[in-house]
């Protein structure tokens, strides 16, 4: 280990003045068996630092065939290795200049041991959660309703997932997973998360809307307790309440629970039911059947179908078909390639619902279109097509 005299000799050779330096001089030395593989560094922003300081944890998630992501309680981050030309040293107990004082009368040497070193670190970038897999694995075993009396639900060779299982499989934070479970109308049954079979979900919605009609209730004031009592002979109360949560907003009035059914959600559900078995539907005929199929007093509008159905105004007659954003690729380039195989040219209004979810933090759909598409004018309307040839 160096002595103060040896340090002063080194300063003289380097032509540095001792009075220009801190009184505490760190003398670094490598410990035994130090290796660059012993430690990894990760750069955290203020939010994640406070998250760690509060005693919370960060989790790295991903299957063997997936690129790892890091998750906090409510956000997902991409992990990327960043190389640095400077050697980064791990020195426990080392104090920075702002932590030192010059209260000592003379210089002194502090011997500090290096525990490890590294020439790269993990760089984090906030990223969209990868949630498509969530519905995919839950759809392996959709809930089709209670078993017929005397029979049990056939779950042989079918996997069911708890929240802990989903956290192991899905590359997203727990908060993001919970939000998406709500979006896809999943519910907990016997401790497992399940998505409802679409036909069964529509059956539940039909029971609710028919009850509202028969009782002459307002769609904005559907009493929970009365609904459960009236429909209990047909379906489990938990499923009726789940349906009301999916298609309405819960509120309390005079110590009673009511639901205001959401017109757009109900109309959207009915439209999906009509479109699911048709490749294409004559638009005018579809609009007539759709309006006749929704509960009396509700009005259908095409803007209720953004991101789930695509209208073709160029065909004769005009048509509409099912195209759900949740069925499209999660990768941005793959998404654009797929969209341009479906249609060569898109207006901004048509394509926006199908790329909105790709936008990162502070990113706009306009920026995505500039990067992945080429614009041109067609009959006075701006349209977008692929920047490269796309196989059809």
Image (spheres, rainbow, N blue to C red):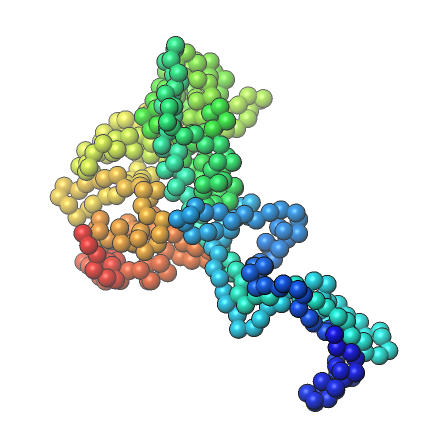
Q: Residue at x 35, y 52 (%)?
A: 331
Residue with the most extreme front position? 33
Q: Say left or right for 226 vs 200.
A: right
Quadrant of the rendered image containing residue 332? bottom left
Look at 26% across and 43% down and name the residue there: 310
Q: Position of residue 245 (x, y in %)?
A: 46, 29
Residue at 52% in and 28% down: 251
**Which quarter shows the N terminus?**
bottom right
Q: Which one is in front, 132 or 122?
A: 122
Q: Quadrant of residue 97?
A: bottom right
Residue 243 at what x, y percent from top left?
42, 26
Position in image of residue 248 (x %, y %): 44, 30
Q: Is residue 167 above or below residue 47?
A: above
Please give left or right for residue 237 compared with residue 366 in the image: right
Residue 120 picture location, percent across and down: 53, 65
**Residue at image location 43% in from the left, 55% down from the top:** 360
Can the viewer see residue 176 in this picture?
yes
Does residue 375 appear in the picture of this structure? no
């Amino acid at each position: 280990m160096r002595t103060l005299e040896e340090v002063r000799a080194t300063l003289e050779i380097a032509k540095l003045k001792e009075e220009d330096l801190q009184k505490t001089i760190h003398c670094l030395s490598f410990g035994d068996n130090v290796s660059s593989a012993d430690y990894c560094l990760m750069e955290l922003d203020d939010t994640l630092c406070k998250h760690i300081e509060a005693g919370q944890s960060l989790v790295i998630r991903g299957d063997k065939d997936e690129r790892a992501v890091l998750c906090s309680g409510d956000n997902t981050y991409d992990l990327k290795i960043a190389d640095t030309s400077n050697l980064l040293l791990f020195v426990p107990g080392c104090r920075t200049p702002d932590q030192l004082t010059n209260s000592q009368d003379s210089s002194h040497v502090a011997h500090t041991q290096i525990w490890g070193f590294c020439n790269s670190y993990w760089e984090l970038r906030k990223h969209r959660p990868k949630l498509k897999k969530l519905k995919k694995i839950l759809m392996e075993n959709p809930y089709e309703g209670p078993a017929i009396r005397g029979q049990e639900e056939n779950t042989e060779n079918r996997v069911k997932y708890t929240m802990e299982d989903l956290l192991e499989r899905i590359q997203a934070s727990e908060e993001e997973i919970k939000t998406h479970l709500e979006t896809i109308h999943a519910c907990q049954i016997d401790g497992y998360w399940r998505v409802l079979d679409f036909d069964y979900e529509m059956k539940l919605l039909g029971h609710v809307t028919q009850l509202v009609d028969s009782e002459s209730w307002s769609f904005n004031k559907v009493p929970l307790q009365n609904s459960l009592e009236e429909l209990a002979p047909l379906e489990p109360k938990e499923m009726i309440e789940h349906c009301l949560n999916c298609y309405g907003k819960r509120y309390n009035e005079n110590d009673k629970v009511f639901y205001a059914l959401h017109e757009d959600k109900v109309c959207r559900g009915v439209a999906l039911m009509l479109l699911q078995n048709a490749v294409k539907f004559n638009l005018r005929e579809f609009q007539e059947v759709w309006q006749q199929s929704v509960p009396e007093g509700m009005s259908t509008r095409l803007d209720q179908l953004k991101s789930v159905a695509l209208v073709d105004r160029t065909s004769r007659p005009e048509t509409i078909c099912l195209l759900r954003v949740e069925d499209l690729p999660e990768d941005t380039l793959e998404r654009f390639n797929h969209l341009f195989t479906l249609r060569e040219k898109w207006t901004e209004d048509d394509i926006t619902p199908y790329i909105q979810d790709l936008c990162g933090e502070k990113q706009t759909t306009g920026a995505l279109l500039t990067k992945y598409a080429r614009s041109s004018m067609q009959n006075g309307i701006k349209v977008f097509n692929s920047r490269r040839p796309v196989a059809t």
